[in-house]
Image: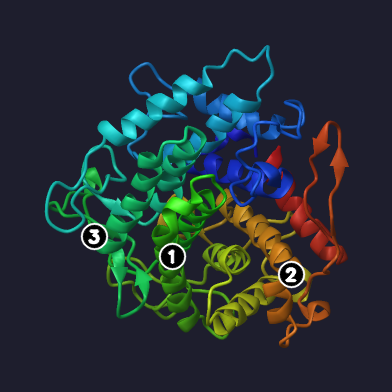
Amino acid sequence: MNNSSLLSWEAGTRAETILEVDFPELSVFSSEYLSFASPYTPEALTSVISIAQTAVSNRTSDSTQLWGASSSAGDPTSLGVVVLLANRTHSSDDSTQYAQAAQEQLELILTGTPRIENGLAAGAISHRTDSVALWSDFMYMTPPFLAYYGAITNNVTLILEAYNQISLYRSALFSPSASLWQHIYCPGAYSAAYNNFNDSGHWATGNGWAAAGMLRVLATMKNSPQASQFHSQQNDLSEWITEIHAGMANVLPASGVFNNYVDIANGTRVPSIEHAWNFPDASGTALFAGTVYRHVTLSNPANYTKIVEAAETARNALYAKNGSTHFDGEGWLMPVVDPHVFAQAGNHSDEAQSFVLQLENSWQAWLGASAGTSLASGGVDNANTGVGSDIGTNSSGGGRQGGLVIATPTAVVVVLGALVMLST
């Protein structure tokens, strides 16, 4: 699948995944991410820079949104990090105006987007351009962009705004009784035309988006020179990630695969969405498990044994029978929610492919960390998880283009198939 066929958040998620897997030193999860001495040539970074180029070139004359005009205010900001990175690493003959595009996207989300004006979550930036609505998806899109922009420009106020937006969104979307986030909060009157509606359901991918976005902001803070100024914020973010992980772990089915709305039985009606019926979703499952491993590696939070066990159950389920249960012959994860219709089952999902690669990458990092090693020794047999534990890179051309290679024969097809769809 080429970049031009993607919607903005799919391209942004793809770009972040390529960074984490193929160019980890440039990802915010690396302590070296702010180094301006990139170990990669612009040619090696083509898979990333090409996404940034498309994000800038697709802008329209009537909008400063990356990737082109959209009714979503938050989704285009998912491309902000890769555009800023391209500004640092592009070749001298690339005339793309990355810095200007990133700045204009920043100004639009901060000053040209509706906000909640009073009451609950006052000051929260809307995920929509045409109305005020808070979606959990926003967590992965906008706060990481704000934090990264602040980190590379030494703008503490901007980093704090990333945290502030997370806090405001949590005040509106977190359900304490379930320890999960609802999907959408809309303070205005119902309007299908303007996506003005509430979804109080606990959507699997939405909770994954929230945890993953907070992890990226946490890592941006922790691995920045300003880290000492954000102790309390880092503690809050870690606690808020833990809330979601605990809530998700409590409702993981015996199958190891979450339902699309995690605390509603498979095949039953979803009360918060008209004419919607629940179904299993491997996409949100992969995102959950990947964020658990990443959080343990990044922060080593307390009391995570049961949460890690849930992540291991989920990961093992996805890779059962060498991946033949949850991947088709071309490497697509299944079953998955339709990435464009959140209450409907889909066929192929580009974001799901990204989530699988993030899962495998963060699992490997967890195995290599001291915290992961001690937890894994408590009963996880890597030889029986459905995938091999020997991971390498498949080199080609000017840089690492192949990414993760899993030793089990069938799984080689699965993960390389996912990477081919991700990178081409």
What type is the residue that disc 1 sits on? Asn
Q: Which of the 4 image quadrants contains residue 2?
A: top right
Which quadrant holds residue 313? bottom right
Mark 1 against mark 2, which lies toward the viewer? 1
* Mark earlier in primary sequence (3, 2): 3
Give whichever of 307, 188 is nearer the camera: 307
- Seen in the picture, residue 149 relative to 382 is either above or below; the reply is above
Q: Quadrant of the C terminus?
A: top right
Q: Say which residue label 3 marks.
A: 198
Which residue is nearer to you in this view: 12 or 194? 12
Q: Which residue is mark 1?
A: 235
Q: Secondary structure at mark 3?
A: loop
Residue in view at x 37 percent, y 40 percent: 158
Type of residue at label 2? Leu
Say which residue appears at 70% left-offset and 49% top-offset.
21
Q: Is residue 338 left or right of residue 388?
A: left
**Going by the image, does 72 lie left or right of 327?**
left
Residue 4 appears in the figure: no
Seen at 63% across and 48% down, the residue is: 17
Q: Count neighbours of disc 3 (C-alpha within 10 A) and say few if under 14, some if 14 to 19, many if 20 or more.
A: many
Query: Which one is nearer the viewer's eye here, 397 or 278?
Result: 397
Residue pointed to by mark 2: 367
Q: Position of residue 264 (x, y in %)?
A: 39, 78
Q: Residues within 10 Å of mark 1 (few under 14, many from 20)?
A: few
Q: Rounded to the nearest whole Å, what is the CA distance between mark 1 and mark 2?
A: 24 Å
Q: Is residue 363 left or right of residue 140?
A: right
Q: Position of residue 250 (x, y in %)?
A: 46, 83
